[in-house]
Amino acid sequence: MIKASCIAVVCIFVVGVAGAQVESPTSRLDAASKLTSLDAIDQPAWHLKLDVTVFGDKGKNPTEGSIEVWHAGADERTVYSFGDASSSTLKHDGKTYYAKTGVSVPFEVSEILRQVLHPGPRPDETIGAVPDMQKHKFGKVELNCVMLTQPIKGAGSVPLGLFPTYCLDAAGIIRFTYNFGGQTVILNRMGTFLGHDVATEAVIREREFDVASAKVATLTTYTPQPDEFIPGPNMVQVGVAARLAGGVIAGNRVSFVEPMYPESAKENHESGTVILHAIIGRDGHVHSLRPVNASDPDFVIAAIAAVRQWTYSAAGSYCKYRFHVYQCSDTGCQAVEVFAVFAER
């Protein structure tokens, strides 16, 4: 059943408040995550199909594809189909399996699926975080935005969205997410399924351009077959993420964007160093960035904007770098420290 609830960049329509408001930022975000998450193991088995569009440079050259997910308790099978590229991920008996054909599926596809299934914070985003709640206006509507602030050595106050930020409407539902200091996730339309509020339309935007969009084509309960979650002969078991030295991973970088020197730093003749904690996925893209050390928030924003565009040679080998020093999972290949140095020229 679809609710009369939609959200857009200029105009927002939200549902009314139901029940008492929870004042603690942590409690409000936890409640919102549970309300909008579909991947709990205690739910009836369900099948989801998403129609997905990924956009090229500046929101142009759209490419269309689909994602299908079959979820039953702790087991889950996901199939990505995108032109000549396709991949499958299977979770069964606490193990994860992976297979792909053709080129790698665009990494934005898996991210927009996560935003539909579990728009709340990742576990690594909450470790050591101090939730900071601020009110922010979108058009004429004011939302409660919770930023999971992490301490940054040497930096003062940070702008909203520098750390993962989740904005809730009056009903306590997550509708906007800021990430990487510039990426925005908009949950445009909401529906109800198995007692949860689910995004039926979602958009990922970087700056003013759409990067990916998704629309729910099918979401229904179903009865799993006995052998449905048995891995096929073409599937390879993958393990857990592990740490890899920054110097080793740097040698496998295949594309690089240099950070832009902030105008404020130029005017003040400032230099500085930023250390970011990164998680790189099997597709070679940076999936998560968290500031560790910085002298100025403007340096952090510039570093994140550049590093999130870097890619690595993991893209063609389902999570193997041929170093045999670590294992990977469906959530990422390794945790590394990435350095960005700013010096006045």
Image (cartoon, rainbow, N blue to C red):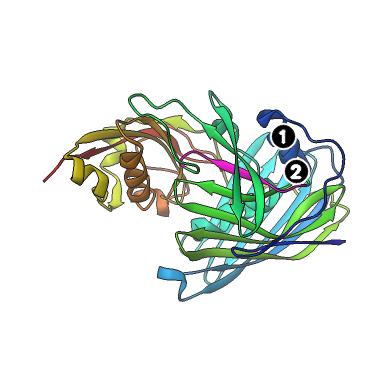
Q: Secondary structure at mark 1?
A: helix
Left/right of residue 254 with respect to residue 21 in the rendered view: left
Evaluate if marks 1 and 2 touch, with contact meaning CB atoms under 8 Å apart.
yes
> What is the x, y in percent for residue 69?
71, 55
Q: Which residues are magenta?
A: 162-170
| Circle number at residue 28 | 1
Residue type of the residue flagged with mark 1: Arg
Task: Please give the residue where the numbered disc 2 appears in the rendered image.
Answer: 172
Decide: is 171 above or below 213: above
Seen at 77% across and 32% down, the residue is: 22
Examine the rendering and report whether any part of residue 85 can be seen. Answer: yes
Rendered residue at 25%/33% (across/down)? 273
Using the image, determine if residue 128 lies above or below residue 314: above
Residue 125: mark in rendering: none
x%, y% of residue 244? 37, 31
Residue 262 in view: no
